[in-house]
């Protein structure tokens, strides 16, 4: 048996924008070792509105792969993916999966293995819906830090203004 099984997701419709899709998922052969018949289902989602989250931009197609009658979670054999970088927006991009129960994108069990200008390679230890996510907002901890820096800057500015007014009043 081969080391990996490649899942190609494409369209036969020449009007479709996904006919030359270069994004892919590679499933390790170990996921199929105990199966006599294998059914792999793969999807590409055209409509991303179901997956939208307020503070994240989906920066790739959404790829999905499942194996019938097999639940893949915390696998020792990584599922490999490649995503084309669609938007030239600067920011932190990472491979994530959509957690249907929590209705959020999460990077748990996924990590980026290679980050190039036009493509990003990832590995995950489970199967579900995957995409390249651009986090356009800061994490929950950063706004507090920025608020403190802003408050400190405001206080220093007011203190300097008061000292300037006093010095002009004292030394006309």
Image: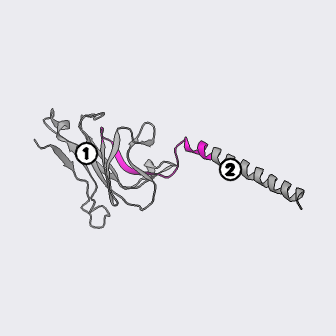
Q: Residues within 10 Å of mark 2 (few under 14, many from 20)?
A: few
Please report the residue visible at 28 percent of the width from the left and 60 percent of the height from the top: 21
| C-alpha gap between disc 2 and disc 1 | 55 Å
Q: Nearer the viewer, residue 110 or 24?
A: 110
Q: Residue most toward the left? A: 1
Q: Nearer the viewer, residue 134 or 58?
A: 134
Q: Nearer the viewer, residue 27 or 66?
A: 27
Quadrant the C terminus occupies: bottom right
Label ID, residue 41: 1
Quadrant the N terminus occupies: top left
The magenta span reads 124-147
Query: Is residue 96 depicted above or below 34 in this figure?
Result: below
- Front of the two marks 2 and 1: 2
Q: Residues within 10 Å of mark 1 (few under 14, many from 20)?
A: few
* SS at circle 1: strand
Label ID, residue 12: none
Please report the residue visible at 33 percent of the width from the left and 42 percent of the height from the top: 128
Q: Position of residue 135 (x, y in %)?
A: 47, 50
**Label whose residue precedes the other's in the sequence (2 or 1):** 1
Q: Residue most toward the front? A: 171
Marker count (numbered): 2
Label ID, residue 153: 2
Tell me: 79 left or right of 50. Answer: left
Q: Position of residue 42 (x, y in %)?
A: 27, 48
Q: Is residue 111 magenta?
A: no
Tell me: 106 left or right of 6. Answer: right
Disc 2 to disc 1: CB gap under 8 Å? no
Q: Quadrant of residue 78?
A: top left
Q: Quadrant of residue 22?
A: bottom left
Q: Position of residue 118 (x, y in %)?
A: 33, 60
* SS at circle 2: helix
């Amino acid at each position: 048996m081969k080391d990996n099984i490649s899942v190609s997701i494409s369209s036969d419709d020449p009007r479709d924008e996904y006919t030359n899709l270069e994004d892919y998922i590679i499933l390790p052969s170990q996921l199929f070792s105990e199966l006599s018949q294998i059914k792999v289902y793969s999807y590409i989602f055209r409509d991303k509105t179901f997956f939208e989250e307020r503070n994240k931009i989906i920066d790739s197609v959404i790829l999905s792969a499942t194996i019938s009658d097999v639940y893949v979670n915390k696998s020792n054999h990584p599922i490999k993916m490649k995503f084309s970088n669609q938007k030239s927006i600067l920011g932190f991009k990472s491979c994530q999966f959509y957690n249907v129960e929590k209705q959020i994108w999460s990077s748990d069990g996924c990590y980026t293995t290679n980050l190039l200008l036009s493509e990003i390679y990832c590995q995950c230890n489970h199967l579900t819906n995957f995409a390249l996510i651009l986090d356009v907002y800061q994490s929950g901890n950063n706004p507090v830090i920025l608020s403190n820096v802003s408050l400190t800057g405001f206080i220093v500015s007011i203190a300097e203004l008061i000292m300037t007014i006093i010095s002009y009043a004292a030394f006309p």
